[in-house]
Image (cartoon, helix red, strand yellow):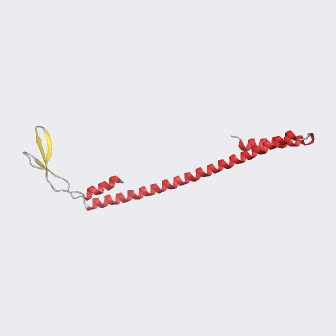
Amino acid sequence: MRHILLLLAALSLPVQAATIYKCEADGKVTYSEAACAGGKPVETGKGPTQADIERARQQAEKERKTEHKLREREQKRELKDAQQHHKAAQSATAKRKRCERLAQRQKWAEEDAARASLKSAEKARTKARRAAEKHALECAS
């Protein structure tokens, strides 16, 4: 984009119509604005035409729009990535809390089974085993 703007600026500057001479002396070629013995004038370009300037302007505008679209697309992608990251973090937090709750229930069930009387001991052990299985199923890493 910057290159196009520099090109536009360079193309819009007026070209000086100075004659340039190509001089050869001792096998060396030099260019000069002053005529030299045996020097030949070199044809220089007349500068950009109005059509060239317009094409360069249109190209610069097209590149600016493309750059703007790319920037917008990148911002949307970054926003989507941030939302997905936030959602994943929330999900991980919810799972951690659920696992902590299940671990606590398992611990309580084991304590209840240890304190249970002979009559209710089997029921309490079954409850503790099931709590441990549920915790292992949902929280296994």
Q: Is residue 52 left or right of residue 126?
A: left
Who's the residue at 11% across and 48% down the image? 40
Q: Is residue 131 visible?
A: no
Q: Residue at x 84, y 42 (%)?
A: 112
Q: Position of residue 9 (x, y in %)?
A: 28, 57
- Rendering coords of residue 60 (x, y %): 35, 57
- Whether 112 is drawn above or below 56: the answer is above
Q: Quadrant of residue 135?
A: top right
Q: Is residue 54 above or below residue 93?
A: below
Q: Which quadrant holds the N terminus?
A: bottom left
Q: Is residue 54 left or right of residue 44?
A: right
Q: Can residue 122 be seen from the camera position used here?
A: yes
Q: Residue furthest top?
A: 26
Q: Residue at x 25, y 60 (%)?
A: 49
Q: How many marks?
A: 0
Q: Nearer the viewer, residue 141 or 106?
A: 106
Which quarter of the rendering shows the C terminus? top right
Q: Residue at x 28, y 61 (%)?
A: 51
Point out the residue furthest to the left here: 37
Q: Position of residue 55 (x, y in %)?
A: 31, 59
Residue 87 located left or right of residue 1: right
**Residue 19 spot, x, y in % from top left:** 13, 53
Looking at the rendering, which quadrant does residue 102 occupy? top right
Residue 30's image quarter?
Answer: top left
Seen in the picture, residue 103 relative to 47 is either above or below; the reply is above
